[in-house]
Image (cartoon, helix red, strand yellow):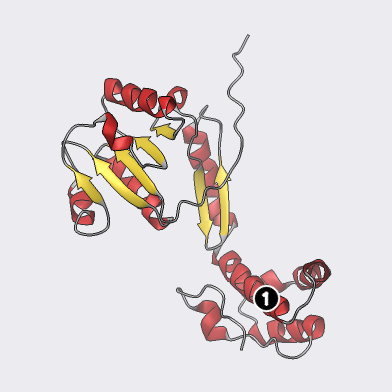
């Protein structure tokens, strides 16, 4: 009989300004560090041998200790990721973290993790996580590539616009429960396809029909790579 895999509790963590430790200095550690930084974490790396690009990040983006791991490295950390090729070190990191009830992930060793990292499709505020519960990272990667083709840049732009509309509605003292049918009308009216096809006049017409005056689209803000919320004129 096949052994039942772990049953994981899906969660998205806010790690902005939280201290996170990465033990290891190679290619895997580099990927983990970059993802943590993208999510706003304060990252410390400990490893006797360090990738060149990690060395460059140590010029201000991360704290680097170029030495072997010590249990004291866990002090004040929110989570730890073990990314070394030394199984003994990885097991020690896991054991130390478990004693402190810390979040711990050991790369490619799900049996030593109390959380695992999914494959991710990122389209701005749209985050799609794919997990096989550690059974087949290769299949998770394959699914991620397929979903990246299915969910294009238009989804990021859609959420930029929807977020701006929601913010403006809330500023007008509308009750949040009133918003749901308005957003459903926009989506059912083909807003996503209009964004994908860059039919900006049609978008403004739909916004007017559903929301009334004051919701004109600022195309420059919508398409800006740095845009987040300010997409309405």
Q: Say above or below: 230 vs 137.
A: below
Q: Where is the N terminus found, in terms of image quarters? A: top right
Where does the image place residue 15, in percent across and percent down from the top left? 46, 51
Q: Secondary structure at mark 1?
A: helix
Residue depicted at 52% across the width and 52% down the height: 121
Q: Say above or below: 154 vs 106.
A: below
Which quarter of the picture shows residue 194?
Answer: bottom right
The residue carrying pointer 1 sits among few (fewer than 14), some (14 to 19) or many (20 or more) residues within 10 Å by Cα, namely some
* Residue 28 visible in the shown view: no
Toward the viewer: 107 or 113? 113
Toward the viewer: 140 or 217? 217
Q: Is residue 54 left or right of residue 81?
A: left
Q: Is residue 184 left or right of residue 73?
A: right
Where does the image place residue 103, in percent across and percent down from the top left? 46, 35
Toward the viewer: 74 or 59? 74
Q: Is residue 125 left or right of residue 103?
A: right
Residue depicted at 52% across the width and 78% down the height: 223
Q: Is residue 30 left or right of residue 218?
A: left
Where does the image place residue 42, in percent across and percent down from the top left? 35, 52
Residue depicted at 41% across the width and 57% down the height: 40
Where does the image place residue 144, in percent across and percent down from the top left? 52, 46
* Residue 49 visible in the shown view: yes
Q: Say above or below: 177 vs 2.
A: below
Which quarter of the picture shows residue 96?
Answer: top left
Q: Where is the C terminus found, in terms of image quarters? A: bottom right
Q: Say above or below: 214 vs 86.
A: below
Toward the viewer: 152 or 157? 157
Residue depicted at 27% across the width and 24% down the height: 89
Residue that numbered label 1 is attached to: 194
């Amino acid at each position: 009989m096949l052994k039942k895999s772990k049953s994981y509790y899906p969660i998205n963590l806010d790690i902005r300004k939280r201290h996170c430790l990465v033990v290891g200095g190679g290619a895997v550690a580099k990927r983990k560090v970059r993802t943590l930084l993208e999510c706003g974490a304060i990252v410390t790396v400990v490893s006797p041998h360090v990738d060149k690009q990690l060395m460059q990040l140590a010029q201000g983006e991360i704290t680097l200790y170029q030495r072997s791991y010590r249990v004291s490295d866990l002090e004040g950390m929110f989570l730890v990721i073990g990314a070394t090729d030394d199984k003994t070190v990885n097991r020690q990191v896991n054991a130390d973290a478990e004693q402190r009830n810390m979040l711990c992930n050991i790369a490619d060793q799900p049996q030593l993790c109390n959380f695992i990292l999914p494959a991710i499709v990122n389209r701005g505020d749209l985050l799609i996580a794919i997990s096989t519960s550690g059974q087949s990272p290769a299949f998770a990667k394959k699914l991620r590539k397929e979903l990246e083709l299915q969910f294009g840049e238009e989804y990021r732009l859609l959420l930029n616009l929807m977020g701006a509309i929601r913010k403006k509605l809330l500023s007008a003292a509308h009750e949040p429960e009133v918003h749901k049918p308005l957003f459903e009308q926009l989506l059912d009216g083909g807003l996503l396809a209009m964004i994908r096809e860059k039919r900006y006049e049609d978008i403004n017409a739909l916004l007017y029909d559903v929301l009334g005056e004051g919701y004109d689209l600022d195309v420059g803000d919508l398409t800006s790579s740095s845009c987040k919320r300010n997409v309405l004129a």
